[in-house]
Structure formats: structure tokens, C-alpha cells
Image: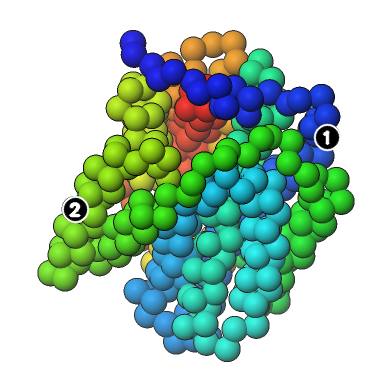
């Protein structure tokens, strides 16, 4: 199997020099808290969509953009911010992203209309990209390889724990107070995380790269991925087909450009010269693409089709991420000792079974059937994510 050679600078990034040691416990607290509250935000908002739509008289398409605008910004800015973090400093990127996210989230709590909410959700996505692009790199740089699976598992479990509690807590907050309280809680949490970073972690313990930022590649990527995502979200409309094709053409141009660039914003050779890295990322893409919309679709299905209140819907949806959080922590530790690729394959197969069961639901489907399908899906996702991430980061 052919692998890329590791640049000496990258070896330096993986090792902490004596004068740059960091409090790994507080770093783990900060990253786990961030990994908890970011998905908590998204899942809680999904539960609140019905109340948001009623207050602002929004259509189903407009409601989808409350979530879609956030995801679009996250995808568009993730790669450029990841590269900027290498050059500018990962800790700085993490800190400013957290502050930016806190401000945007607070403003979301006071929006007067749907257009403002969608716009601020886009801003939230930009801030989230700043944090997400650096979180795992910070964790990997601070912990030795033999603990990598464990800390990855803990962080992935935090993601799923946030997702698991969000439907229940978000439904309760929406029914008892208003959907705006969800944003207030997240803004407060983000502020506390930012204060922790400033107080104890506001220094660079990994070397920055003395390289030029690839503005040309970044612009091509951002335009291409924006057209691609917009086109896919509007299919099968005629104009959507045009946007999708234009986006695919743009991504082809981006790849050709990056292969000729000395300091690319995305090193395409990671995919062409490292088979394990490429296939692991492809597996992650397939798995996330197949499962990511479950909470969004089911939250609307349970409330609109089955007539369940937001709190009850949250109690049903909580089963999947709870199982995911438990299994992800276990599978992360297990991937330090066992073949992580086999564990990820077991997880992918289980996810396929869960999705197959959910494909048959209708308004007469029993709650127990949905709970069973979500349990299997949660097990599969938890078994897949931590080992597969361990393979990628390795």
C-alpha cells in the first residue's frame, strides 16, 4: 500500500516541545464542551422548527433553510479555515470562532423575522467552521498516539450526547418557554468556553506553518461547493440541475488547480497517494450523507404526521444519540487495540439496517418500531464514527 511521506514540519506539529506543554485536561474539557453544544444547537433547533414556522409563518422550504443555511456556511468555510488555522494558529482560530459563535447565537435569540434568523444561522455556520476546523487537530497534537482512540471517542461521544439531550431539552424549552431560549442557553455556554480558553489555553503549543495562504484555490472551492450544495438542495428543478452541474465542474477545476499549487488550501495528494485516508473519508461521506437528515425529517414527521408534541417527539428521538454516545466512547477505546477498519465496517452495516427499517414508516407505524430502528441506527453510527476517525487521523 502506497502512503505519502510525512513532512518534517508535520512531525513537529505532532510533538509538544517542553516549553509549549498544555493542560490536556482543560483542553479536553473545552473541546468536549464545544463538541457537545454545537450539535445540541442543531438538534434542538430541529425540534423547535414547528414553533418557529408558526411564529414567522414559514413554508417547509423556508424552514429547511433554517438548518441548511448553517450547514452551507459550515461546508463552504471549513476547508479555508482549516488551512488558516495551520498558518495563523489553531488556538487563535478556536478562540475567535467560539467568540464569534457566542455573539451570533445571542443575536439569533432576538430576531424579528425569518430572514434575519436564516442570515444569522449562516453566520453561526461560519463561526462553527472556525471551531470545527481546528478542534480535532488540537486534541491530536496534545495527546500521544496510544491515547488517540480514547480522546477521539470521548469527543465523538460528546457530539452524540449533545444530540441525545437536545431533542428532550429543546422540546421542553420550546413548550415551556419559547424557542428563543435555546439560543440563549447556547450563547451562555459558548461564552463560558471562550473564557476558559482565554484563562487557561490562550497560547499556541503547536508550530504554525510559514506558508502562503491559497486565496485562489479557496475562492474556487467556496464558489463551487456553494453552487453544488444549493443545486442539490433544490433538485429536481431545472435550474437546480444547472447549479449542480456547475458546482461539479467547479470542483473539477478546484482539484486541477490544487494539484499545481505549491501550498494548496487542500492537499489533494492526501487522497490520491494514501488509499486508507481516501477510503476512510469516502466511508464517512457515505455514512453522514445517509444519516444526517434523520433527526430533521423525523422531528417534522412525528409532529406533523403523527401529531406528537415537541417534548414527546424529543423523548423518542433521544434514543438514537444516547446509544451513539455510549457506543462511540466504547468503540473509540476499542479501536486503540483492535482493527478500527473492521469496527467501522460493523458500524456501517448496522446503520444500513436501521435506515432500511426507517424507510417503511408511515402515520400508522408504532412508536416501538421507530424506537427499535433508531436504536440500531445509533449503535451503527457509534460503532462507525470513532474507529473511522481514528483511521483518518492516523
| Residues at marks 1 and 2 touching, judged by CB atoms closer than 8 Å | no
Q: In front here: 11 or 252?
A: 11
In this picture, residue 156 sits left or right of residue 351: right
The residue identified by callout 2 is 249
Q: In front here: 180 or 365?
A: 180
Residue 148's x, y, as percent? 63, 23
Cα gap from disc 1 to disc 2, whole angstroms = 45 Å
In this picture, residue 159 sits left or right of residue 266: right
Looking at the image, is mark 1 or mark 2 earlier in the sequence? 1
Please tell me which residue is depicted at 39% across the width and 76% down the height of the picture.
Answer: 62
Residue 228's x, y, as percent? 27, 58
In this picture, residue 342 sits left or right of residue 46: left
The residue identified by callout 1 is 23
Scheme of colours in the image: rainbow
Q: Is residue 236 visible?
A: no
Q: Is residue 240 shown above or below 160? A: below
Circle 2: element type: helix
Residue 103's x, y, as percent? 68, 71
- Number of numbered discs visible in the structure rendering: 2
Residue extending farthest right: 199
Residue extending farthest left: 238
Please tell me which residue is depicted at 44% across the width and 67% down the height of the picture.
Answer: 69
Circle 1: element type: loop
Query: Quadrant of residue 350 in the image?
Result: top left
Q: Is residue 378 visible?
A: yes
Amino acid at each position: 500500500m502506497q502512503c505519502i511521506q510525512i513532512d518534517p514540519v508535520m512531525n513537529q506539529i505532532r510533538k509538544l516541545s517542553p516549553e509549549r506543554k498544555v493542560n490536556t485536561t482543560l483542553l479536553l474539557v473545552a473541546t468536549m464542551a464545544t463538541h457537545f453544544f454545537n450539535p445540541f444547537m442543531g438538534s434542538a433547533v430541529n425540534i423547535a422548527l414547528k414553533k418557529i414556522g408558526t411564529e414567522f409563518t414559514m413554508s417547509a422550504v423556508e424552514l429547511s433553510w433554517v438548518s441548511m443555511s448553517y450547514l452551507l456556511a459550515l461546508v463552504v468555510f471549513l476547508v479555508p479555515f482549516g488551512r488558516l488555522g495551520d498558518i495563523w494558529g489553531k488556538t487563535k482560530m478556536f478562540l475567535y470562532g467560539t467568540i464569534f459563535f457566542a455573539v451570533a447565537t445571542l443575536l439569533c435569540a432576538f430576531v424579528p423575522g425569518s430572514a434575519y434568523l436564516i442570515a444569522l444561522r449562516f453566520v453561526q455556520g461560519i463561526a462553527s467552521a472556525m471551531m470545527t476546523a481546528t478542534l480535532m487537530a488540537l486534541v491530536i497534537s496534545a495527546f500521544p498516539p496510544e491515547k488517540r482512540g480514547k480522546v477521539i471517542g470521548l469527543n465523538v461521544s460528546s457530539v452524540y450526547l449533545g444530540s441525545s439531550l437536545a431533542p428532550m431539552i429543546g422540546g421542553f424549552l420550546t413548550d415551556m418557554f419559547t424557542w428563543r431560549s435555546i439560543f440563549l442557553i447556547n450563547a451562555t455556554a459558548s461564552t463560558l468556553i471562550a473564557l476558559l480558553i482565554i484563562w487557561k489555553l490562550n497560547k499556541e503549543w503547536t508550530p504554525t506553518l510559514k506558508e502562503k495562504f491559497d486565496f485562489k484555490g479557496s475562492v474556487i472551492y467556496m464558489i463551487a461547493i456553494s453552487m453544488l450544495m444549493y443545486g442539490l438542495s433544490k433538485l429536481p428543478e431545472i435550474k437546480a440541475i444547472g447549479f449542480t452541474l456547475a458546482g461539479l465542474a467547479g470542483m473539477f477545476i478546484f482539484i486541477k488547480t490544487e494539484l499545481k499549487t505549491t501550498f494548496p488550501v487542500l492537499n489533494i495528494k492526501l487522497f490520491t497517494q494514501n488509499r486508507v485516508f481516501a477510503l476512510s473519508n469516502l466511508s464517512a461521506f457515505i455514512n453522514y450523507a445517509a444519516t444526517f437528515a434523520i433527526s430533521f425529517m423525523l422531528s417534522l414527521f412525528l409532529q406533523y404526521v403523527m401529531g406528537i408534541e415537541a417534548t414527546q417527539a424529543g423523548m423518542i428521538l433521544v434514543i438514537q444519540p444516547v446509544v451513539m454516545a455510549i457506543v462511540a466512547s466504547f468503540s473509540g477505546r476499542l479501536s486503540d487495540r483492535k482493527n478500527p477498519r473492521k469496527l467501522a465496517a460493523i458500524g456501517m452495516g448496522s446503520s444500513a439496517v436501521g435506515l432500511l427499517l426507517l424507510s417503511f414508516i408511515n402515520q400508522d407505524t408504532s412508536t416501538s418500531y421507530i424506537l427499535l430502528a433508531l436504536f440500531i441506527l445509533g449503535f451503527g453510527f457509534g460503532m462507525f464514527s470513532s474507529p473511522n476517525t481514528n483511521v483518518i487521523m492516523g
